[in-house]
Amino acid sequence: MTDASIHSPASGGKSSLLALDARTKRRNAAEARFRMYGISAVAAGVFFLVVLLGAILSNGVGAFQQTFLTVEVYLDPAKLDKKGQRDIADIKKVSTFGYTPLVQQGLFDQIEANGIETPLAKRKDMKALISASAAAQVRDFVIANPDRIGDKVEFRVLTSSRVDGYLKGRVTRESVARDKNIKPVHLDLVDSFTDLGIIKKEFNWSFITGADASESRAEQAGMGVSILGSFFMTLVVLALALPIGVAASIYLEEFAPQNRFTDLIEVNISNLAAVPSIVFGILGLAVFIQFAHLPQSAPLVGGLVLTLMTLPTIIISTRASLKSVPPSIRDAALGIGASKMQAVFHHVLPLAMPGILTGTIIGLAQALGETAPLLLIGMVGYIATNYPEGIASGFMDPNSAMPAQIYEWAKRADPAYYERAWGGIIILLVFLLTMNIIAIILRRRFERRW
Amino acid sequence: MTVKLTASVLAIAAVSASAAFARDNVQVAGSSTVLPYASIVAEAFGENFDFPTPVVESGGSSAGLKRFCEGVGENTIDVANASRKIKDKEIKACAEAGVTDIIEVRIGYDGIVFASQIDGPAYTAFQPVDIFNALAAKVVVDGALVENTNKQWADFNADLPAADIAAFIPGTKHGTREVFEEKVMVAGCKAAGAFDLYMAANGGDKKAAGKACYEVRTDGVSVDIDGDYTETLARVDANPNGIGVFGLAFYENNTDKLKVATMGGVAPSTESIATGEYPVSRPLFFYVKKAHIGVIPGLQEYADFFISDEIAGGDGPLAEYGLVSDPELEATQAAVAAGTTMAEGM
């Protein structure tokens, strides 16, 4: 009797569990609609993710390949060591500008040796093909091996960014029609050299390990130094934010009395977590550089700024994981005579550790991808050029960071840098993904549920 | 344990930094127009000398000069790049902070070009007056100044295409904007006769009349770009009728996407700018703190190297990138070698 009145309050008469009435149909339809909304929302998210990843991969993968050129260079004693004493001071006096013609001559000789027909009849015409970095490479070799002067030595040097772009399909014959750096005849020559195996595309390790390069040598630029910059900044953040954050949250969660003052602190920590990162950049500029006189562009300063930014994230996640440890654990510890501190450090903290570490790693990943505060403390520009010499130099010497380097490359004029910016994003994403996976593994392995 | 170790290493590093930190690399900041040239020089400098590669930051001429004028000492920059001459106001600010001896170095000239999308309408022949008529806040109609309502280029010059006006010009924080105002807007203003009208309205005050000529219309036809040329390029790329203001070097790196317009019948190139035929160009500078020479290793060598013939000369890498080399380079070299400051040079 009651059943019937629930199923059909209005009609009051025949009703069946098998035949749906209008109201149930409406409810079912509403549910189906909601499911569809949900699925389309997820689908939209997945779609954008796929588009984004597709764009990143298709634009950036080219940066991991680079075109190289094998050239035999005659290390002419008349040019490189005029006095013939093999004195290193004399050899060093010859600048890279003295080496450039030798490298060009080396490639130019290949034209005749292989019987290639080309209207390019001058040694200087080879300039469009060879990267400016080649001369520096040969000079470094000669300074390291002065006894090889007078020999013919084979070098594997970079091609210019235009030639590299041509082999990757970025530069075409039509697009160079009005380019003053390279002409279609050069591209014909590149084709011949490619057939002979003199010009080859290979995996580009120096993109991952190398230093930043100037505006005119996109082909030489690499992320290596800025990866180290990011590494040292992350160390600073880890060394400062983890102990300070954990200590603050243990005190607030376990020891602090509940009063207006602690409430105020609590609210402000949440507020701090929402402060835009650029604000921390201005703060860092004013406090660390202008007041404390720490050096410009140093990863130490970058790390300090990012510490300020990461602290609230770590405090909030640490407090949440401390809170999730059941009170019975504390009560049991106190019940058998442990002091408050013993209860916290011997029992609560170990149980909260996986949560704390996860929060810290997420905070670090966030800091690793942050660009805005770094703009203000001088980490954007032509900065990441020298490898740090040791630990102190790693913290103090000017360096950039991965996201700042990507930003800088995206601004530069040569389209080859655009490709490298996307390549840099791939490297950054790999780092972020690794950190997130570590966080997930830690959580999966050590997390305990009550 | 490791955390403790890193923390103590950090503490030591921080203490040694504030106490006796000896900087061994040259630090440069300033104009983003000069940055490409400075980075090319810094790279070659690092390769050819036993000093570390100098650090070059960007951020704009004004920001660079402001930091330059913060004072003397190792935590201030040694060199400021600028795409305009230092202002008297800035020299005064410098002097107040103790930066009294400044060496001014002119490295060459930079051309400013107008360019549109490669498939866009043929804006091949501009005169400054065309740009003024398109972009100024007020234009001359029948001898009187009225609000600019020109919608299409053909509205005021039948030789130009009937395409909507859409211009992307550098924002006011850029040194490029000043050149645009002085070399294009004022020249156009005079040619259109608006300058005389402004003169009359301001009681013969040349300065006020010039300022009035700078006024750009605010109805969305002219857009200020505060970012870099890459942003301007993206805007022009997205707008078939758009015309953007670029540096010559940037244009030469993107000839596959951009079509350059002539100004006064002359196409921009390093040659036409050097001879002065192409009117829109400006000198580029860097400023050296004399007090840092001898203290920061490599500073004198860097300054000498920057303007040496093999770098800044007609066949050097800077000219190849798009710098118009300075015909008076020799005098500059002598002045830098002798350490002639701005006060002594006058």
Image (cartoon, grey):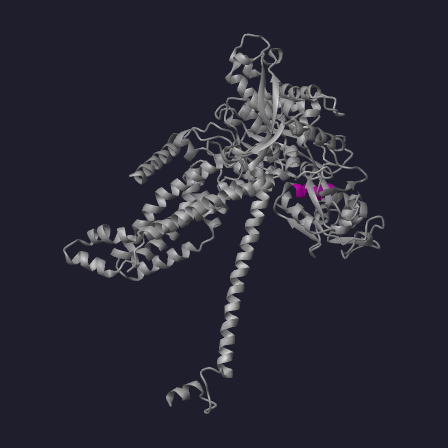
Q: In this view, does A22 lie to the left or right of A238?
A: right
Coordinates of residue A213 in the picture (x, y in percent): 56, 32
Quarter holding the C terminus of chain A? bottom left
Does the magenta run of residues contain B107? no
Horizontally, is A238 left or right of B221 in the view? left
Count of numbered circles on the image: 0
Residue B28 to residue A136: above or below: below
Q: In this rendered view, identify the residue nearer to me: B263 or A61.
A: A61
Residue A241 place in picture, x, y as percent: 36, 46
Q: Which residue is at 42% across, 40% downward?
A: A233
- Please tell me whether the stretch drawn in magenta is mainly helix, strand or loop: helix
Q: Residue furthest bottom?
A: A13
Q: Does the magenta stretch include residue B182?
A: yes
Any part of residue B304 in sight: no
Quarter that holds the N terminus of chain A: bottom left
Residue A351 position in % (x across, y down): 27, 53
Residue in the foreground of this view, choosing between B235 and B290: B235
